[in-house]
């Protein structure tokens, strides 16, 4: 294959069966599922006792914010949840005011499409998700078609805001019990990914895929650990050292011990003790060395949130007064550059919105056309078609097609589930609220396996919400939902094909240039004996981030339809060269022995050295 970019266009096959294949559930699937139930139930039950079920859609708008930011450290989660709630209230305010000023359905659909495009672009730029923009679009689009007056809007917004505050409290509730839960999970995922790569390091496509996944997991772990920019706690520094071990394993997979990495990953989860890693150049699993002036410790670990301690002559003494100078230097060398990276301000939002322009245009055009077609067919709720179109748009055409297949299949099965549940929900207000809560839980519990499986519960949830103001004929709801789903999926996908992302190929070229420059800088610093550890570490981190971005950019561009063939060979060669440089910088930092100077220690869990 030529390294030059060919000029011929090619079309890619779009998957069908593969789009419906079930995956493994998320490690924390139960957290958003339980959180949304805890956030929705109290406001809904309170309004039920007051005989005002018609107001539940407004409180549910705020309650659904509890679905967000479960992967963020709690200090960062507090800010993200606050911004999500403000964004939800902003979209809801625009929708309520628009619904108060006009009943022209075409105008309302247009407003809904523009809101959907803005919500999509901002959520993608800030990486808020899952569930990203879909929940915000559902709330604002549904509110557009509920009769309003300007006098009612403040009260409805106040209900949504109160429920949003409750959702914020629900999202932050686990913090006192597991203050470092998100950081622990991200670190464990990085260690497991590094172990998987070490096991497949003999090469081939499987090894390359595991390597990309491992680098992405390590990069995600650093993003999680660095999301909080204040002075790191002892626990967070211990987790940072474990991520360094994952980086060392990526640099020298043949010398890595997957069993040890997985053992560390298991120990990190939960609220147990954080394992000591020791010197990566000496294969000790949580044992404090005699030659460092340290005595063996059977636990070899740190309690969550506690400062490190050691034993000296049988007495348990303060670590700050007894830790040897060599230990301090080693820790400083391992984590050099982390403080500097934590101090770097994130990229401004406007610079991240530029590359998302094609996706935003697709969203606006697709949602508007889907709503117009639905209106032309006589639909009473064109926002169903609008939300269906909004939910389709992913990073490229191939993923958008897969989401369209998943959405259609999930909604068709979901309307059948609604037909079965509707008689139970119509038994009374309590039965209706309980069915809504069950659908909320089921949607979040299943959506991690595959989007279509979650949609099976989302569809009856949306249909049950329409019955809160009063019961409606089941047949009409089912028919309308099926028609709007098909319209939204078809029109939305056609709009995605019509608005081609011609920037995809140029973004790959820019990503290749960034990797080449970062690799040249790291190579130069690694070869310069006078380069400081901080400069070398900053260059290494920059190169690692550039490699992860290159793979993500290449994968996104590869899924675009009807575009020029991509320089796949250049991407692969750039990745290989970058990984060799990353290994060289880790070795230059002294975190690995020089090749051939030591023998690999094989770790067996439970064995003594």
Image (spheres, rainbow, N blue to C red):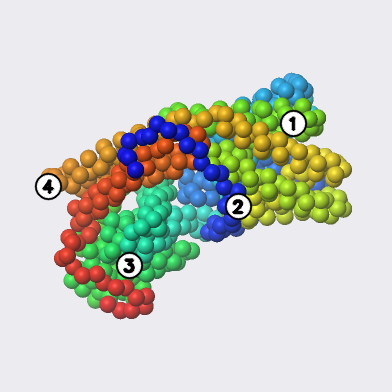
Q: Nearer the viewer, mark 2 or mark 1?
A: 2
Residues 414 and 376: in front is 376
Instruction: Indicate which disc, 2 or 1, sits on the residue closer to the N terminus.
Output: 2
Q: Is residue 288 above or below residue 71?
A: below
Give the alpha-carbon distance from disc 1 to disc 3, as whole Å.
58 Å
Question: Around disc 1, counting alpha carbons within 10 Å, would you say few (fewer than 14), some (14 to 19), or many (20 or more)?
Answer: many
Seen at 66% across and 25% down, the residue is 111
- Left or right relative to 495: residue 79: left
- Left or right relative to 17: residue 189: left
Residues 85 and 452: in front is 452
Element carrying mark 3: loop
Which residue bears the numbered disc 1? 374
Q: Nearer the viewer, mark 3 or mark 2?
A: 2
Instruction: Indicate which disc, 3 or 4, sits on the residue closer to the N terminus.
Output: 3
Say if residue 373 shows up in the picture.
Answer: yes
Residue 341 position, x and y percent, is 32, 43
Seen at 52% across and 30% down, the residue is 500
Q: Are marks 3 and 4 in contact (CB under 8 Å)?
A: no
Question: Around disc 2, counting alpha carbons within 10 Å, would you say few (fewer than 14), some (14 to 19), or many (20 or more)?
Answer: few
Instruction: Indicate which disc, 4 or 1, sits on the residue closer to the N terminus.
Output: 1
Which residue bears the numbered disc 4? 529
Element carrying mark 4: loop
Which residue bears the numbered disc 2? 17
- Left or right relative to 30: residue 6: left
Element carrying mark 1: helix
Residue 257: numbered disc: 3
Residue 487 position, x and y percent, is 71, 35
Seen at 66% across and 36% down, the residue is 490
């Amino acid at each position: 294959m030529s390294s030059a970019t060919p000029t011929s266009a090619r079309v890619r096959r779009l998957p069908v069966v593969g789009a419906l294949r079930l995956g493994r559930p998320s490690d924390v699937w139960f957290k958003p599922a339980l959180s949304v139930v805890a956030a929705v139930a109290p406001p809904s039950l309170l309004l039920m006792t007051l005989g005002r079920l018609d107001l539940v859609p407004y409180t549910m708008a705020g309650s659904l914010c509890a679905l967000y930011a479960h992967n963020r450290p709690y200090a960062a989660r507090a800010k993200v949840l606050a911004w999500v709630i403000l964004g939800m209230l902003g979209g809801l305010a625009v929708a309520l005011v628009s619904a108060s000023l006009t009943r022209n359905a075409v105008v309302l659909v247009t407003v809904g499409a523009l809101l959907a495009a803005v919500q999509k672009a901002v959520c993608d730029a800030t990486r808020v998700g899952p569930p990203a923009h879909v929940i915000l679009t559902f709330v604002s689009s549904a509110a557009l078609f509920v009769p309003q007056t300007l006098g009612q809007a403040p009260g409805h917004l106040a209900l949504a805001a109160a429920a949003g505050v409750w959702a914020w409290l629900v999202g932050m509730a686990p913090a006192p019990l597991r203050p470092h839960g998100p950081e622990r999970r991200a670190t464990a995922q990085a260690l497991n990914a590094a172990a998987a790569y070490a096991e497949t390091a003999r090469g081939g496509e499987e090894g390359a895929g595991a390597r990309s996944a491992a680098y992405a997991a390590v990069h995600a772990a650093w993003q999680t650990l660095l999301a909080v920019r204040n002075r790191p706690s002892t626990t967070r520094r211990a987790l940072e050292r474990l991520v360094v071990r994952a980086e060392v394993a990526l640099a020298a997979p043949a010398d890595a011990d997957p069993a040890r990495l997985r053992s560390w990953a298991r120990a990190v989860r939960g609220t147990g003790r954080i394992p000591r890693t020791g010197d990566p150049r000496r294969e000790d699993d949580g044992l404090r060395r005699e030659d460092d002036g340290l005595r063996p410790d059977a636990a070899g670990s740190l309690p969550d949130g506690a400062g490190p301690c050691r034993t000296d002559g049988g007495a348990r003494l303060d670590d700050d007064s007894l830790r040897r100078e060599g230990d301090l230097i080693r820790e400083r060398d391992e984590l050099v550059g982390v403080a500097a990276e934590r101090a770097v301000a994130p990229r401004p939002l406007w610079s991240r919105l530029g590359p998302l322009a094609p996706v935003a245009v697709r969203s606006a055009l697709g949602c508007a056309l889907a709503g117009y077609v639905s209106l032309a067919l006589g639909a009473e709720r064109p926002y169903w078609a609008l939300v269906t179109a909004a939910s389709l748009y992913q990073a490229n055409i191939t993923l958008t097609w897969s989401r369209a297949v998943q959405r259609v299949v999930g909604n068709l099965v979901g309307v059948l589930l609604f037909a079965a549940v509707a008689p139970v929900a119509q038994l009374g207000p309590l039965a209706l609220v309980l069915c809504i809560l069950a659908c909320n839980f089921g949607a979040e519990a299943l959506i991690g396996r595959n989007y279509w499986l979650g949609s099976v519960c989302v569809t009856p949830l949306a249909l049950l919400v329409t019955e809160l103001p009063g019961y409606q004929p089941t047949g009409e709801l089912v028919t309308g939902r099926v028609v709007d789903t098909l319209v939204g999926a078809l029109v939305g996908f056609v709009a995605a094909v019509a608005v081609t992302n011609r920037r995809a190929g140029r973004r790959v070229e820019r990503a290749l240039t960034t990797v080449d420059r970062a690799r040249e800088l790291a190579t130069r610093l690694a070869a310069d004996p006078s380069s400081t550890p901080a400069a070398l570490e900053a260059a290494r981190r920059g190169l690692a981030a550039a490699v992860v971005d290159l793979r993500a950019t290449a994968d996104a561009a590869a899924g675009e339809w009807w575009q020029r063939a991509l320089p796949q060979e250049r991407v692969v060669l750039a990745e290989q060269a970058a990984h060799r440089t990353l290994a060289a910088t880790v070795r230059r930092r002294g975190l690995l022995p020089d090749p051939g100077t030591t023998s690999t220690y094989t770790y067996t869990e439970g064995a003594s050295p």
